Image (cartoon, rainbow, N blue to C red):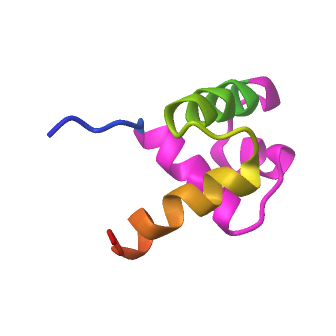
Amino acid sequence: MTKIITELQEKIIYLLIDGKNNYEIAEELDISFGYVKKNLRQLFKKFNVSNRTQLVMAVLPIKSGNYD
């Protein structure tokens, strides 16, 4: 099965779920603020959402193992 997100994007999602902002994510992952934003835009597109809250809501069932 093909993974739809990168390892970095997965880390970004977990940090979003933990309530981190873009600057905190960039600092924790040792990447630039712009690179965080780029990856978030890619994630929004992949999950067909338009903001961080929608992204978290879209991935929470996946993260918790609830597929219903």
20 or 63: nearer the eye?
63
- Residue 37 lies, in percent from the top left, at 75, 30
Image coords of residue 58 (percent x, y):
55, 56
The single residue placed furthest to the left in the displayed view is 1
Please provide percent x and percent y for residue 68. 33, 72
Q: Residue at x 59, y 27 (%)?
A: 42
Residue 29 lies within the magenta run: yes
As for residue 31 lying within the magenta part, the answer is yes
Residue 2 visible in image:
yes
The residue that appears at 14% across and 40% down in the rendered structure is 1
Q: Residue at x 81, y 52 (%)?
A: 24
The residue drawn where x is 74% and y is 57% is 53
- Residue closest to the eye, 26 or 21: 21
Q: Magenta stretch mostly in which secondary structure? A: helix
Please provide percent x and percent y for residue 44: 63, 35
Seen from the viewer's position, the closer of residues 20 and 61 is 61
Left or right of 3 in this view: 41: right
Q: Is residue 13 above or below residue 19?
A: above
Name the side, left or right, on which 20 lies relative to 3: right
Report the front residue among 60 and 67. 67
Place residue 45 in its image quadrant.
top right
Say if 67 sits above or below 35 in the image: below
How many numbered badges does the structure rendering display? 0
**Range of residues picked out in magenta:** 7-34
